Image (cartoon, coloured by chain):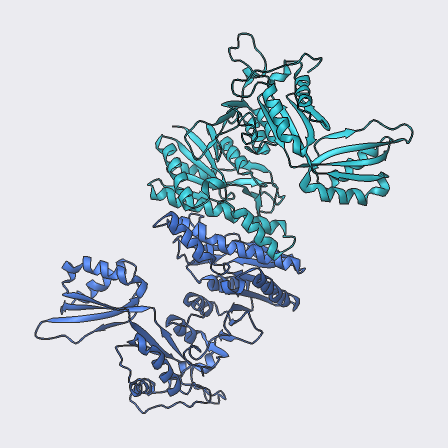
Chain colours: A cyan, B blue
Amino acid sequence: MGRIVQKFGGSSVADAASIKRVARRILNAKLAGNDVVVVISAMGDTTDELMDLALQVSPQPKARELDMLLTTGERQSAALLAMALSDLGAEARSYTGSQAGVITTGKHGDARIIDITPGRVEQALDEGNVVIVAGFQGVSQTTKDVTTLGRGASDTTAVALAAALGAEYVEIYSDVDGVFTADPRIVPGARHIPVISYEEMLEMAANGAKILHLRCVEYARRENVPVHVRSSFSDKPGTWVKDLPASSTDTEGSKMEQALITGVAHDRTEAKITVVGVPDRPGEAAEIFDTIARNEINIDMIVQNVSQVASGRTDISFTLPSSDGRKAIEVLNAAQEQIKFEELLYDDQIGKVSVIGVGMRSHPGVTASFFRSLADADINIDMISTSEIRISVVVDADQVDAAVRAAHTAFGLDADGEAVVYAGTGR
Amino acid sequence: MGRIVQKFGGSSVADAASIKRVARRILNAKLAGNDVVVVISAMGDTTDELMDLALQVSPQPKARELDMLLTTGERQSAALLAMALSDLGAEARSYTGSQAGVITTGKHGDARIIDITPGRVEQALDEGNVVIVAGFQGVSQTTKDVTTLGRGASDTTAVALAAALGAEYVEIYSDVDGVFTADPRIVPGARHIPVISYEEMLEMAANGAKILHLRCVEYARRENVPVHVRSSFSDKPGTWVKDLPASSTDTEGSKMEQALITGVAHDRTEAKITVVGVPDRPGEAAEIFDTIARNEINIDMIVQNVSQVASGRTDISFTLPSSDGRKAIEVLNAAQEQIKFEELLYDDQIGKVSVIGVGMRSHPGVTASFFRSLADADINIDMISTSEIRISVVVDADQVDAAVRAAHTAFGLDADGEAVVYAGTGR
């Protein structure tokens, strides 16, 4: 008898009818002979509504109390789901994150899972129950206060529980059929990806694919927990995210045709700040990024322009989540005397487009093909960043769709398409 | 520096503005030099809304899961109140019942407090915090599951915490100014009662006065915790419920003029069942009430009619909460073969009117005065029940108001009224 963990998102439990439908799906997994642990998000817009309520009461709600408030959403859906399962004849018990042994750091609003002590969950499983765990939450190891793991982190709870319980795999249910080669709303010919490696999924998640939370994929890779991303509205197979050692290199005798590029991701949530006229001396760039880091703002790409010899000054551009834009501008302006820059430019009308695939490790010319496809579509590249299995460019916001389509076509990802690789040096 | 416990009901925290108003009131108590512990109910109609949601999901929600669901309401209001207090500059921390050490029996939906282990509350107070505790809930001593204490039991949480923390007194805030000699909506001349004994308040609560929960008054009496019932919408003094040994008898030299009757309570929530044609043999009445008790239905008054010698049969009437009426009829009908009654009559168009006062212990004639006042108002008495400090009658539902007014006037409770005590034997 297998042991599996299923996770359902807020859109899967938006109302009473949805909760009952999810209960039937869980029942089927139980009847198929599995021990089932379910991690559940808050119903529909509950978390947003609770946040609105908090802001009505306080302009800057205390983080500890916000966690106390927001965690009630998942507790409600967990209890309701357990009721629905009992009606179907499956004994079920709901647990808060704390009761389920989700031990975290003490950083309210963005805690990390340190450990899982699943004693109560194990016992409830042994007694034949379906176990429902409220996602997104845990209990601080030091203060014993209720914590949240950051939004979207119910996926991480599911993977962490699966690792602690020795589950065979995790099913992550949402309202889409899995991972596609590009966003089907932009590329109608985008194809469903049946299997993807942890590494590629990490790059997809880090570069705008919203299907899985980055931290969840990291956790799954570290613990080697296979994750099946699928829709709660159909029975179609979704996308398996798992260890794919054979596909990461073109091993001799491999029968599988390896695509150069697995998918094209895009992200419109970033903004670009350009620090103009920074004295071109050692330490000036460090000063800028120290200031940013001290304020807990994460940056993504960085470009330092070629120095203008005449003035002895240079310009430095970087991207960051546009939600942190205002704060970054404020702290940089406050530090103008130390950094001695001339002015700040801010642009949130940008987008990032990334091509991702382990295949590019062994194939030169991918970069050239990507850039040529953009040039052919009259798209100007503003910034560039690469990893071993990813190439990202920043373009104008209104050219993101065209860039995604151009890359998708160029790498043969369209249905019946064929990759066009331009000759090139390096990648 | 004193230590006090304040409890605010759902109507006091119905929305964000109310929560902020309550926060200011708590702040004032803190600034006056008190250590303050606050017990809070769920916002407005939250509990009813959650119950509706549960019934949409399941026709008979599991009690354990219902407790998990309903307790989120108080957790939300507790967290929001703590946020509001922090904004005012008072450090505040919210705790669930479980975190505050409210240990209960395991009966979901109607658990009893067994013990309070207030270690975390004590520590938070020592650190200078206002402590906010989610009312109405605790944790089962045996299963460690979340429990609820039954509706309205946040009052009991407050008193239990006060006893465990050695607090000076408890303030129970609601939307009324305290206890009155009768419901002011029925008797416009009803007077505010500044002080009332535990015993009298117990009888008031048990006989329809909704101002305090019966179990809360029992707890306060047992632990000798003074309770101040007052309005969260004004600064007027409310009603003190406390030990009043001197007033329970007319001690020599007492300067206080003792009213015969402290108040008139009424209750429209009961129904009457008459079991017609019960064989008049020993054990038949026991059979009826065993059947009722096995089904956990509480009954109030019982009257056995004079036996009809010719038939060898008698009629037995009793009252019970009308919410249990259907169930009682069902279980009695199912037991008709054993009990051998002829038929069942059901009447929920009744009301109970009670006069309450420790003064009646030492004054004969109270019963006669009460019944005479009803007779003068052409009100027919259907059933009668008494305790040492209370006389209750059942009357037609549409005569309840008139009966309350008649008794209120007869015992001199109207503003500037004077008690008329008829001569009588016994009471």
Query: In the current view of this chain or complex, which residue is farthest to the right?
Result: A310
Residue in the picture at 66% in, 66% down: B31
| Residue A418 vertical position relative to residue B164 in the rendered view, above or below | above
Query: In the current view of this chain or complex, which residue is farthest to the left?
Result: B310
Give x and y (percent) for residue B301. Answer: 28, 71
Query: In the current view of this chain or complex, which residue is farthest to the top?
Result: A253
Query: In the current view of this chain or complex, which residue is farthest to the bottom?
Result: B423
Quarter holding the N terminus of chain A is: top left
Q: Nearer the viewer, residue A22 or B323?
A: A22
- Left or right of A113: which side holds A376? right
Q: Nearer the viewer, residue B1 or A317?
A: A317
Confirm whether residue B206 shows in the render: yes
Q: Nearer the viewer, residue B312 or A82?
A: A82
| Residue A98 vertical position relative to residue B216 in the rendered view, above or below | above
Give x and y (percent) for residue B119. Answer: 56, 54
Residue in the picture at 44% in, 78% down: B184
Confirm whether residue B146 shows in the render: no
| Residue A104 vertical position relative to residue B223 in the rendered view, above or below | above
